[in-house]
Each structure stands twice: as structure tokens, then as C-alpha cells.
Amino acid sequence: MKTIEKEVLPTQDECAGSLKNILDALYVLNGKWKIALILSLVQSPKRFNEIRKEITVISPKILAKELKDLELNDFIKRTVYPTTPVSIIYEATDYSRTLKSVIRELSAWGEQHREKVKESMRK
């Protein structure tokens, strides 16, 4: 990592504002599944079992809870089709696409962190 010696530090008010914003974001996106679910549904709309096949380590109970939370916060849309049996399709909303840069940055940081861990294991 680079260290910048003459970096201007944010003011106390700027830090407090950033902290509040981050806490708000983490409150909505908390847990280890929400961003993964959004990413899955941005790729294509899916049924419950299709999501489970893609994210195999999530339990059905937790998946149902996370989908409800995401729907309440307008990240996904749940559509019920009156077929026999009933078909339910989950899809990403336009609002979920506002997380594109956040997801990209998390992915880049995750890759960087994985390499750091591998490097420290080689020592």
C-alpha cells in the first residue's frame, strides 16, 4: 500500500458525516449474503431454487430472510405468477444497480486481500 505523506486529513465534521453515511449503508447491506444476492440477481432474474444452486452455502431460511430484507429496501422485486404450482421470480431493481461501483470496489479489494493472505502464508 502507498503512504501519502502530505495528504489532507478530513475535518471532524467530515469524518462524522462519513461515519453516519457508512453506518446507514451497512445497516441496509449488513450480513454476508445481501451483496452476493444482489450480484446474482443483477446477472439475471431467478427463482428461489436457482439462487440456492448458485449460492450453495446459504440455508433456505436465511435466503428467504435476506430476500425479504432486500425487497423491503427496494433492491429486488418479487413477482408471483399464478401458475400451478405458483412461480415466484426475483429480479434486481434499477436501485440495486446503483451499487455497481461499490461491488466493483469490494471485488477489487477482495482480490487484493486474497493475494496479501497468500503472500503472508508463503513467509
Image: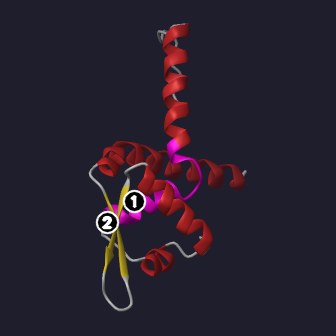
Residue at the spot of label 2: 43
Q: Is residue 13 above or below residue 37?
A: above
Q: Most prominent secondary structure in the magenta stretch?
A: helix
Report, in whole angstroms, how far the alpha carbon at label 1 lies from the one at label 2.
7 Å
| Residue type at the position of mark 2 | Gln
Task: Report the coloring of the rendering.
Answer: secondary structure
Q: The residue under label 1 is which amino acid type? A: Leu
Please, is residue 28 above or below residue 85 in the view? above
Q: Which residue is mark 1?
A: 39
- Label 2: element kind: helix
For the question of whether residue 57 can be seen, the reply is: no
**Mark 1 closeness class: few <14, some 14–19, many ≥20 residues within 10 Å:** some
Q: Nearer the viewer, residue 4 or 53?
A: 53
Q: What residue sits 52% from the left and 9% below the top?
A: 13
Asked if residue 100 lies left or right of residue 106, the reply is left
What's drawn in magenta, residue-wise?
28-42
Left or right position of 107 against 92? right
What is the x, y in percent for residue 57? 60, 72
**38 falls in the magenta region:** yes
- Residue drawn at 51 percent across, 33 percent down: 24
Residue 49 screen position, x and y as percent: 46, 81
